Image (cartoon, rainbow, N blue to C red):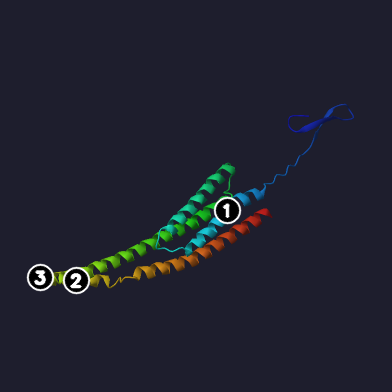
Amino acid sequence: MTPHGSSMRLNNNGLLHPEEYRAVITMKRRSALYIVNFLLPILFFLCLDLASFLISDSGGEKLSFKVTVLLAITVMQLLLNEILPSSSDRIPLIAVYCIGSFTLMMLSLMETILVMYLLERDSASKDNEGRSSQLMEESEQISDELSEAVKTLTLLLNSRKEERKPGYWTRVAKTINKVFLIFYITAESVFLCFMFFNWTRADH
């Protein structure tokens, strides 16, 4: 046998004649390993992140829950980098799946931070209103001149707050939450359908 993958045989004249051959090797990955270890857990994390919209925004439980889920996706990405081949010309679909899921969860986390900021701003405005009413009560015990000055300042503060009454930011936060929930469900459904279509097309 020659080093180039061909064998030598004798012809009728006693001379060596090369005889070439071909070997076809078919390799296929075990898809069940990736489905069980990566695809299903990340899908479960997406469902958990979607279910987190049922948690109240008043406390910090929702924010900590979303951060935990986001960290879990990050760990899954680190494990995926160790398994996938590094010398690849194209980005694997499973990597696109992880990056897309990470992006959706990051947007959900940013929306939660924005909603909590608006609720905190609304509660701060309520506290300021309580303080102004307390100043009005204390001003009755001071001299007439000081009481007029305090009332004038209080009226100026209240006139500025009329545009943003207590409860305004809470309504804005609830509206943002509802709109983002619809966007999140739509984006997640379109993303999963897109990934399923690409996987089925790649198999065929």
| Residue denoted by label 3 | 143
Kind of residue at disc 2: Glu
| Contact check, label 2 and label 3, Cβ < 8 Å | no
- Please provide percent x and percent y for residue 7: 80, 31
Q: In this rendering, is residue 46 above or below 16?
A: below
Q: Quadrant of residue 14?
A: top right
Kind of residue at disc 1: Pro
Q: Residues under labels 1 and 3: Cα distance?
A: 70 Å
- Please provide percent x and percent y for residue 79: 55, 45
| Residue denoted by label 2 | 137
Image side of residue 99 versus residue 147, left or right: right
| Contact check, label 2 and label 1, Cβ < 8 Å | no
Judged from the image, the secondary structure of the residue bearing numbered disc 2 is helix
User: What is the crowding at mark 2: few (fewer than 14 residues within 10 Å), some, or many (at least 20)?
Assistant: few
N-terminal of the two: label 2 or label 3? 2
In the image, what residue occupies the spot 10% across and 70% down?
Answer: 143
Image side of residue 119 versus residue 146, left or right: right
In the image, what residue occupies the spot 46% across and 56% down?
Answer: 65
| Contact check, label 1 and label 3, Cβ < 8 Å | no
User: What is the crowding at mark 1: few (fewer than 14 residues within 10 Å), some, or many (at least 20)?
Assistant: some
In the image, what residue occupies the spot 34% across and 62% down?
Answer: 120
In the image, what residue occupies the spot 48% across and 61% down?
Answer: 52
Q: Residues under labels 2 and 3: Cα distance?
A: 13 Å
Front-most of residues 165 and 193: 165
Judged from the image, the secondary structure of the residue bearing numbered disc 1 is helix
The tally of labels here is 3
- In the orientation shown, which residue stands out farthest toward the front? 141
Q: In this rendering, is residue 24 above or below 157?
A: above
Q: Nearer the viewer, mark 2 or mark 1?
A: 2
| Residue denoted by label 1 | 41
Q: Quadrant of residue 84?
A: top right
- Please provide percent x and percent y for residue 111: 43, 61
